[in-house]
Amino acid sequence: MQINKIEVSELVEDSLPEYKKNSVNRMLKLLIKSKTGLIGLVIVLIVTIIGIFAEQLAPFDPNAINPMLINKPPAWLEGGEFAHFLGTDNLGRDLLSRIIIGTKVSLIVGVCSIAIAGFIGMIIGLVSGFYGGFIDNFFMRLVDSFLAIPNILFMLVVLGVFGPGLLTLILVIGATQWVTYARLVRGEVLSIKERDFVKASRTLGTKDRTIVFKHILPNVISSFIVVSTLSIATAILLEASLSYLGLGIQPPMISWGGILEGGRNFLATAWWISTFPGIAITITVLGIIFLGDWLRDVLDPRLTK
Amino acid sequence: MAKYLRKRLLEIIPVLLFITFIVFFLVFWVGDPVALMLPEDAKQEDIENLRSALKLDEPMLVQFGYFVSNVVQGDFGKSFRYGEDALPIVLERLPSTLTLAFTSMIIAVLIAIPAGIISAIRRNSATDVFVTGFSILGKAMPSFWLGIMLILIFGVIFKILPVSGNGTWAHLVLPSITLGTAVSAEMTRLVRSNMLAILQQDYIRTAISKGVKPLSLILKHGFKNALVPVITIMFLQISTLVSGALVTEVVFAYPGLGQLLVQAVSGRDMAIIQAAIFVVAIMVILLNLLADLLYKVFDPRIKYN
């Protein structure tokens, strides 16, 4: 990993004059060089395709209860059937189909909540960093307050008040994750604001809005994309935790955390119900982390986390 | 020092006020508890009387004033479920959560410090790749799933450890490992990168050329200097630790704050929810303050201002 980073910064320096022309080439070069990045990209692509075409790909109706098929083990164990490859749950529902449909919910929650968080955080960060003073002070105290309450705690309470469900879940994850973006964007704005090209532009009488959107935003966007990618992983993990606690996605809607919770009481008789959704979560999150690390190398070689 | 402490303590006030407002607002939003407290055929007159007795007919800001004055006196109202004052119920659960957090932190430190140091010294070796891989995997794995897998292995298959409840040290083993592993993932990475930075310092090179023995070089010259960031890292994990404890407690039916809170959220027991948020938020704020102070004690170069 460390070697990669040094090479990356050299690469960037070499290609600076013809940066734009080389950027696609460079991305591909870096992708081939970073094996984990490639693995991450492949995982994310596969998971996304499964999520989008979940209904078509699921071999059985995920909610079809079948008393004849209760707790069937996976295909490779004694008593398993090839048709129900990962086995069935305590109500005879096909586990593979349920995990495939669950992919959709995880992706929707991950992407939508981070879109909301990113939007709020970007605006607050831009305003706070650009104007400073009282506004900055107010928003930063707000950020401190959010940081003082552990995320899960805040979410539990909001879900308790508004009731669980897909929309609440997306909104509440968005409402806690914006803090990261606000801090990131504010920090970037503060440093970019002092750079010569912004000062020059201001001397020429450019409007605030133009400075923010034409000069500052394009410089913030790359670290923003990197952090967003990694945040989707966080959001997916949060969704799973909340659904596991019974306060996230509610049946009949299917989520990985929900399937896991359903299998908790059948560990002795049907270990597979709780095992496979966890593997699905781990692989997905791992893929996103790998992809995010690669994106960081490509888009923002300065960031070393 | 005293001046700095005073400033930091004063900064806590707006954060606490903001948390108070959020907590109040959420409950205000839920609306009138009167309908739940009286029988369905209650007379309009009785409803009005109870409303004014509970000061629910006052404007929102006035209600907020009453709320703040009650909170300052430690009065969060009575729990619906237990019929007693909420704060003592929450405080009663605090020691078991703190015990779990403490033992998990010890496990995390026992894993993260040796693993981080070894992988920094043997940079890019097979050991380093293994440790880095382990720490990424630890981040990708949902901790509640790890808990369930541990229950499956040690409680269901080998039957050597209890999987729920508390009382003996054996009840603490699985929850602490679950939470400790989750925390150690991030910690290992941070210990490794701090140690790497220190190993590149001039005084390390001087020590090597003077012929200092490797073990003494690593422990006395390297790790001793890495200790300051490591302590900060430990405290930075507090929020993760608290969030993790809430979920882990539910997985292992461990009677701490987390379990109490999840039950309160499902049952909409507002008094308990409010008291729990306050207790946890104050705990997190104070521990962070302690981290800041310790940081300055261990590294006298840092100025108070």
Image (spheres, coloured by chain):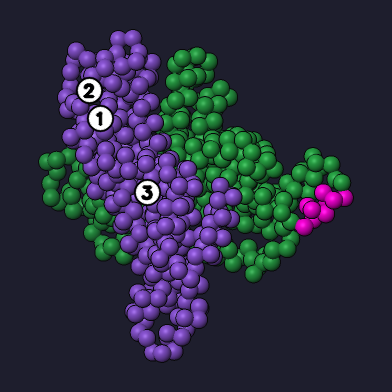
Quarter of the figure with the N terminus of chain B: bottom right
- Give the color of chain B as drawn: green
How far apart marks 1 and 2 lie (CA) works out to 8 Å
Tag 1: amino acid: Arg
| Magenta stretch, residue numbers | B202-210
Outermost residue to the top: A78
Residue B23, placed above or below residue B59: above
Find out whether residue B208 is within the magenta segment: yes
Residue at numbered disc 3: A232
Labels 1 and 2 touching (C-beta < 8 A): yes
Residue A136 rendering spot, x and y as whole percentages: 44, 72
Quarter of the figure with the C terminus of chain B: bottom right
When asked about the image quadrant of residue A250, the answer is: top left
Badge 2 and badge 3 both on one subunit: yes
Front residue (pair A143, A215): A215
How far apart marks 3 and 1 lie (CA) works out to 22 Å
According to the colouring, which chain is purple? A
Residue A38, placed above or below residue B141: below
**Residue A96 visible in image:** yes
Letter of the chain that mark 2 sits on in the rendering = A
> Is B180 on the left-hand or right-hand side of B117?
left
Image point (54%, 44%), residue name = B186
How far apart marks 2 and 3 lie (CA) works out to 29 Å
| Classed neighbour count for the residue bearing mark 1: other residues with Cα under 10 Å, few (<14), some (14–19), many (≥20) | many
What kind of element bears circle 3? helix
Residue B112 rendering spot, x and y as whole percentages: 62, 39
Q: Which mark is residue A93?
A: 2
What kind of element bears circle 1? helix
Q: Which mark is residue A98?
A: 1
What kind of element bears circle 2? loop
